[in-house]
Amino acid sequence: MKVLVTGGTGFTGKALVRRLLDDGHEVVALDYKEGIKTQELRDWGAKVVIGSVTDRDVVESSMAGVEVVHHLAAAFRELDVPNTFYDEVNVGGTENVLEAAKRHGVRKFVYCSTCGVHGNVDNPPAAESAPINAADYYQQTKYEAEPVVLRYHAEGLPSVILRPAAIYGPGDPERFFMIFKRVANGSFPMFGGGQTFYHPLYVDSLVDAFIAAQEPGRGDGKAYLIADAEYVTIENLVRGVARALDVDVKIRNLPILPLIIAGHVCEKVCKPFRITPPIFPRRVDWFRQNRAFDISAARRDLGYDPKIDLDEGLRRTAEWYKAEGYL
Ligand SMILES: NC(=O)c1ccc[n+]([C@@H]2O[C@H](COP(=O)([O-])OP(=O)(O)OC[C@H]3O[C@@H](n4cnc5c(N)ncnc54)[C@H](OP(=O)(O)O)[C@@H]3O)[C@@H](O)[C@H]2O)c1
């Protein structure tokens, strides 16, 4: 098959492109900027189209002959942009890709949303029917694209929505790396009690879910939470990272309120100057938002079956950080 992956050079996109190529598919990756990763994808044999999903011509030029679209491109961690930027990329860009996919007769559209659309989970674990409670502009716009996807589905473009939990694994240079780096130094500041639930998702398991979801008829018109088999407290996550690195970590418990205030103040002060703040509310939320999900619908309808447990996933991730010289 010919498969389009938007955001194909991103952390998850790259893992998905690799799997699709290994499975013998022809892959087109649409991505924002030229860089080392785009060349790597070309070396693997993928075609790379450079440009934004907000540009209809760029999207059009990536869609010829495509049978399956995995739409992963998203404004995600940009902090020095106006909120309208998130709208344009995450909602407008998604509609552009849907529109072109429909016109080209694509037979399956997979939209990568986020578990974050549920915000803080009051009654863990949350299933797809749990309240929508997006906590920030990123999550809100990821959710706003979901009804757009369902509208195109109703108009004849078979579509499925995946809501991944916190993705980690080899190839992630940022998010989990911050945890690994602190733990490797032997001391981890834990704001709050450390008993907040966190639901990791090993990147290869998410790729399994994308591959399952691209099958005709699977999960059409529905949204599915995708996560590891088990969730943990953030304290146990930190202890798991320490085991993976084979270090003793001292967890220092600190009050969370000053951090919450600092996050809001830093964001307010930095935003007008378009400076990325050192602390911001979404980072603080890591310590305080319960994330724990029920993946039984994905197991039942998609045949999703996450095989890598946290210890194994963290071990592989630690190896990658060491091999790549991050640690
Ligand atoms: N990471 C998580 O824990 C998590 C959890 C739930 C859901 N998700 C979702 O999973 C997907 C992949 O996340 P990720 O962590 O792999 O993110 P990532 O590494 O930041 O990848 C996102 C990719 O999208 C590209 N992109 C951004 N804006 C674009 C635009 N306007 N046009 C074309 N491409 C654009 C980026 O290109 P450049 O690098 O060139 O800017 C990047 O390659 C996203 O849809 C995200 O919302 C992530």
Image: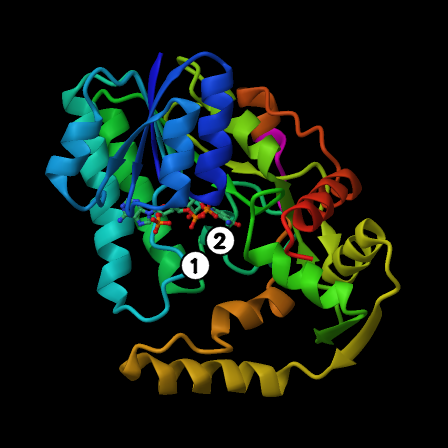
Q: Residues within 10 Å of mark 2 (few under 14, many from 20)?
A: many
Q: Image quadrant for the N terminus?
A: top left
Give the residue type at disc 2: Gly
Q: In the rendered structure, does residue 261 fall within the stretch colored magenta?
A: no
Q: Which mark is residue 204?
A: none
Residue identifier under label 1: 134
Residue 40 horizontal side relative to residue 236, left or right: left
Kindly state the secondary structure of the residue where label 2 is placed. Answer: helix
Q: Looking at the image, do the residues carrying marks 1 and 2 touch, with CB atoms under 8 Å apart?
A: yes
Task: Answer yes or no: is residue 160 visible.
Answer: no
Q: Residues within 10 Å of mark 1 (few under 14, many from 20)?
A: some
Q: Which mark is residue 116?
A: 2
Residue 38 drawn above or below residue 300: below
x and y percentages locating residue 213 in the rendered image? 46, 23
x and y percentages locating residue 47 in the rendered image? 30, 26
Task: Answer yes or no: is residue 217 visible.
Answer: yes
Give the residue type at disc 1: Ala
Residue 133 drawn above or below residue 222: below
Name the foreground residue: 195 vs 81.
81
x and y percentages locating residue 37 in the rendered image? 41, 41
x and y percentages locating residue 221 in the rendered image? 36, 27
Residue 45 horizontal side relative to residue 48, left or right: right
**Residue at 49 percent of width and 27 percent of height:** 18
> How far, Cα to Cα, is label 1 from label 2?
6 Å
Q: Image quadrant for the C terminus?
A: bottom right
What span is in magenta?
Answer: 293-297
Indicate the quadrant where residue 180 lies: bottom right
Ligand 1 within 8 Å of disc 2? The answer is yes
Residue 69 drawn above or below residue 319: above
Ligand 1 within 8 Å of disc 1? The answer is no
